[in-house]
Image (cartoon, rainbow, N blue to C red):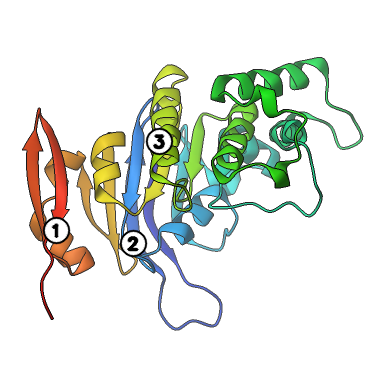
C-alpha cells in the first residue's frame, strides 16, 4: 500500500541530510509506528510522504504509483494527515473542520454536496463527536480536537492515514482512547496507518509494526515485541529499561540510576 524507497532529504542551507536512505513498507489494515527520539527525522519523514516537501531523493509509492507523479488533488485522495496540533485562524465549528476533509472532492467554485455533508457527519459519528458539531473548534478540549482531526481525515476517505504524534499533548486516558480508536479504525476500515509515537509501551500495545529511527536513519523494523529490546532502547534513547511480561504482554520499566 505505502512504500518508501531509499529516501534522502536535506533542508535548504543545511550541510547534512536530515533523512539518510530510509526505506519502509506499511500495509492496509495495519498500524505502523515510527519510534525515535526528538530530532531523529520522524516529522520530516511524514512531510516527505505527504508531499508537504517534495525536493527529496528517493521514492514514495502508493498503490504502485510514485508520489511525484501525482497531482495535489490525487495525493489528497490517497493520503490524509493528522498533525500534532492545529490552531485555525478562524473560529470554525467542529463540523466545518471535519467538512474540510472533503476539499479534494469539491470543485474550486462549487459548494459541498449532500454526499460530502453526509460523509462529514458519518465521520463525526464514527469517532463519537457528533454532539460537538456546532461547537467552536477553538473551545473544545485537546482530546476532542484530536478526535476532530481524525474525523476530518476519515471524511477525506483516503486509504493512507499519517498521524504525527497524535497523543503527545493528551492525558493518559485520552492517549488510550485515541490510540484504541486509531487501531480499531485501521482494522475496520482497512486503512494503512503510519503514526509517530514517543512511548515504546504505547508502540507495544497499539501497533502491528514499528520503524525505529535515530539520527535520520532507520536502524530497525519489524514486530514491536520482537524489535523493542532492552539493548535497542539503550542505544536509541541512552537509558536503561527492563522488560517484564504478563499475560503475553510486554511492558518497559525504566531503570533509575543515581548520577
Label 3 environment density (alpha carbons within 10 Å; few <14, some 14–19, many ≥20): some
In the image: residue 128, left or right of residue 92: left
* Mark 2 vs mark 1, CA separation in Å: 20 Å
Q: Earlier in the sequence, mark 3 or mark 2?
A: 2
* Mark 1 vs mark 3, CA separation in Å: 24 Å
- Residue 41 disc label: none
- Mark 3 lies on a secondary structure that is helix
In the image: residue 112, left or right of residue 78: right
Residue 149 locus on image (x, y percent): 60, 39
Residue 55 occupies quadrant = bottom right
- Residue 21 disc label: 2
Q: Earlier in the sequence, mark 1 or mark 3?
A: 3
Which residue sits at x=12%, y=42%? 226
Q: Earlier in the sequence, mark 2 or mark 1?
A: 2
Toward the right, the furthest residue is 109
In the image: residue 153, left or right of residue 238: right
User: Label 3 belongs to which residue?
Assistant: 179
Amino acid at each position: 500500500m505505502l512504500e518508501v524507497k531509499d529516501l534522502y532529504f536535506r533542508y535548504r542551507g543545511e550541510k547534512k541530510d536530515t533523512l539518510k536512505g530510509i526505506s519502509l513498507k506499511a500495509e492496509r489494515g495495519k498500524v505502523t509506528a515510527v519510534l525515535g527520539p526528538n530530532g531523529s527525522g520522524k516529522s520530516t519523514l511524514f512531510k516527505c510522504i505527504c508531499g508537504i516537501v517534495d525536493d527529496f531523493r528517493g521514492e514514495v509509492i502508493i498503490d504502485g504509483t510514485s508520489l511525484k507523479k501525482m497531482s495535489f488533488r490525487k495525493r489528497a485522495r490517497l493520503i490524509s494527515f493528522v498533525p500534532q496540533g492545529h490552531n485555525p485562524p478562524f473560529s470554525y465549528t467542529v463540523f466545518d473542520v471535519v467538512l474540510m476533509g472533503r476539499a479534494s472532492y469539491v470543485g474550486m467554485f462549487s459548494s459541498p454536496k449532500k454526499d460530502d455533508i453526509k460523509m462529514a457527519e458519518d465521520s463525526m459519528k464514527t469517532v463519537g463527536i457528533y454532539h460537538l458539531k456546532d461547537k467552536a473548534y477553538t473551545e473544545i478540549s485537546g482530546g476532542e480536537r484530536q478526535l476532530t482531526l481524525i474525523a476530518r481525515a476519515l471524511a477525506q476517505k483516503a486509504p493512507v492515514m499519517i498521524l504525527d504524534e497524535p497523543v503527545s499533548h493528551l492525558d493518559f486516558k485520552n492517549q488510550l482512547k485515541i490510540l484504541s480508536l486509531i487501531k480499531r479504525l485501521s482494522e475496520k476500515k482497512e486503512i494503512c496507518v503510519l503514526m509517530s509515537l514517543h512511548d515504546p509501551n504505547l508502540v507495544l500495545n497499539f501497533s502491528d509494526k514499528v520503524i525505529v529511527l535515530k539520527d535520520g536513519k532507520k536502524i530497525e523494523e519489524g514486530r514491536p515485541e520482537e524489535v523493542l529490546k532492552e539493548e535497542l532502547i539503550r542505544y536509541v534513547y541512552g537509558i536503561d529499561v527492563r522488560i517484564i511480561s504478563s499475560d503475553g504482554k510486554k511492558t518497559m520499566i525504566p531503570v533509575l540510576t543515581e548520577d
